[in-house]
Image: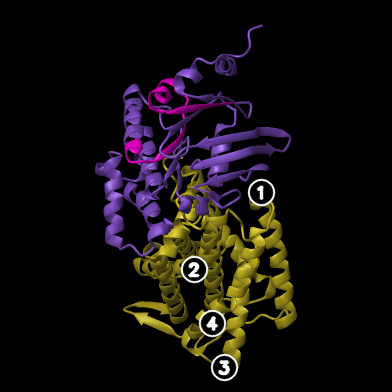
Amino acid sequence: MSSHTFVQALLSGILLGCFYAVMALGFSMILGVTRALNLAHGDLIILGGYLGYWLWSGSGLHPLLLVPVAGAALLPLALLCQWLFQRLPEPKELSSLMLTFGLSLLLQNFMLGLWRGEYRIIASEPLTASVRVGSLVLNQGRLIVAAAALILVAALYLGLTRTRWGRAVRATSLDREAAALLGINVDEATRTTFLLAFGLSGGAGVLFATLHYLYPAGGIEVTLLAIVLTIWAGAGRLRSVLLASILLGVIETLTLTWSGPRWRELVVALMLLGSLLARSGGLARSRSR
Amino acid sequence: MALLEGQGLSMAFGGLLALRGVDIAVEERQVVGLLGPNGSGKTTLFNILSGLLHPTAGEIWFGGTRVTNLRPWQISRLGIGRTFQIARPFVHSTVFDNVLVGVTFRSRDHVSRGEDRRREAERLLATVGLAGKASALAHTLSLGERKRLELAMALSTRPTLLLLDELASGLSPKGREEVVRFYGQLKERGLTIFAIEHSFRVLARVADRLLVLDQGAIVADGRPEQVLGSPRVVTAYLGEEE
């Protein structure tokens, strides 16, 4: 592999990783605060993608303008899911699997009924062009999606570290009982987390639909990706999720460039297993537990 | 009326009755010690008083307000602070940030300025002797330092009543002396303290009153010298003679 090809693959991998991060963050946040595996996470992203596609095909607006619209559209669903989650019997880790699996099936059937099973993509003109940076050629769509993903992650990071509600969410994610004993309304923090995660997923769905084909059952792959990245990075850890996503993107792209698509999934799986064996608590494991 | 009152508190976990109609009263500015063998229900009682568990029967009043079944954050905001037997700071955060959380989220001064909150967090760290560790990550602290950090976190909510769960356990004799000194300081500040300790010696020196739990029921209640010499307490710890 020449150095030029290596740099080209490296950059493409970083862009892909930024996109992966925004795909996984909502899942990771909900797991961090509630210990619930949201099996409908990928379906929420696909739903956001369909909403974006529907608005884009009807209005012709730039897809980036539809990111906040699709995000906002999922907020009522966030409130409903949080309301249902609060009423689940213990242990919530298990009962939430039933709830979110049911939600996943419902969403898939809802999307199938509304948009049929045909493949759809936001094939917006400005996203299909290529950009030349020196001797490197990058896909403009991937570049824009990565920039939008980074902006979303940065906004979330600022919100979580600089605001009162953000501190409440972080403390609740670290230790729910200890946070409550310090006067944090952990129910409110959970509601905020659901709103942020669903909003982020809706917005991420529009970005997804500019790069990948949408179909109603397509959420499963996204959920699996989010599970893998969250296990690898550690639940609720924003910076670690971003780092893990970029690493995954780079390794995937380098493997693809070096050996073609045959080895990509095997190499990624081996790398994940190896790193988990080496660091059993994920990239951001606690050294004290 | 006592600052904290519990009447007929019972807690069942399936078929296991962890508390059986416990009555407690903690007067304002008193240090009340809670003793009992392992599994006697001490931590369950603390979990109920701090809202982490809801009793299957009984009522709790704090400062004349009924607090039975309130959520832990509501109870914290009413003025009950708590530490755990195994200290539970936010291990990935700095010592300073751990204390700042409580200062930020207590109910009474939502509007206080960031600078004031920071100064108060620094003052609390100085109180427990951790000023020099403010920027250290909590997981790097020793057991004794973690316990002191948790005490500072509990104080950060400006409680009127502190529930302290085995502050002295696992510490060296020097560490236990320090804990005795902390009890004295907290009492001087006018705080009411309800404390679980395994060390009779520590409680005998700091407590105004002792309660002894055995198999989920109060078996002794009185001044330390009365309680520690009581045959029922000896039986609770050593068992009946054949």
Residue type for callout 4: Val
Mark 1 vs 3, N-terminal side? 3
Q: CA distance from mark 2 to mark 1?
A: 29 Å
Mark 1 nearby-residue class (10 Å; few <14, some 14–19, many ≥20): few
Is B207 part of what is drawn in magenta? yes
Identify residue for label 3: A59
Quadrant containing the C terminus of chain B in the rendered view: top right
Identify residue for label 1: A91
Residue type for callout 3: Ser
Which segment did they paint magenta?
A: B186-213
Colour for chain B in the figure: purple
Q: How far across and down, in percent of the image, does residue B29 sit?
A: 40, 38
Quadrant housing residue B177: top left
Residue at image position (47%, 80%) is A141
Colour for chain A in the figure: yellow
Marks 3 and 4: same chain?
Answer: yes
Residue at image position (50%, 52%) is A180
Horizontal arrangement in the rendering, residue A74 relative to residue A170 (left or right)? right
Mark 1 vs 4, N-terminal side? 4
Q: Chain of mark 3?
A: A
Mark 2 vs 1, N-terminal side? 2
Horizontal arrangement in the rendering, residue A10 relative to residue B59 (left or right)? left
**A219 is higher (above) or lower (below) than B129:** below
